[in-house]
Amino acid sequence: MREVTSEDVITSLKGVSYPTTKKEMVEQAKKDKADADVIRAIENLPREKFRTTVDIATLFEDKSRRR
């Protein structure tokens, strides 16, 4: 499994309207044939709702700081 970045996730969600839910994000990523690692990363996000792409990016920044 490769390390997925916030850019990978956001790029795979081009058709998503914000605010959105994790479920909607997974559905859109699958519809757009996103990489399995990207879909898994979305499924593992600790939040259920996202107001903007900044919410997504912040989660990935927090994750990288903890390393």
Image: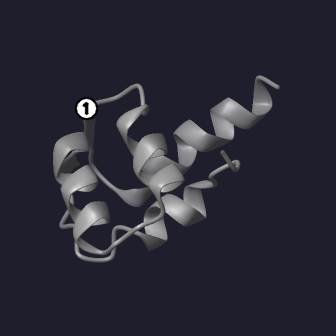
Picture quarter with the N terminus: top right
Kind of residue indicated by mark 1: Glu
How many callouts does the rendering have?
A: 1
Q: Is residue 19 visible?
A: no
Q: Nearer the viewer, residue 29 or 61?
A: 29
Q: Nearer the viewer, residue 15 or 55?
A: 15
Q: Is residue 10 visible?
A: yes
Residue 54 lies, in percent from the top left, at 46, 54
Q: Quadrant of the C terminus?
A: top right
**Which residue is denoted by mark 1 in the rendering?**
48
Above or below, comparing residue 23 to residue 33 in the picture: above
Q: Looking at the picture, does residue 26 appear above or below residue 63?
A: below
Q: Percent position (x, y) of residue 39?
A: 40, 51
Question: Nearest the camera: 25 or 54?
Answer: 25
Please state which of residues 12 and 34 is positioned toward the viewer in this rendering: 34
- Image height check: is 24 above or below 66? below
Among the 4 quarters of the image, the one containing residue 10: bottom left
- Residue drawn at x 34%, y 29% is 47
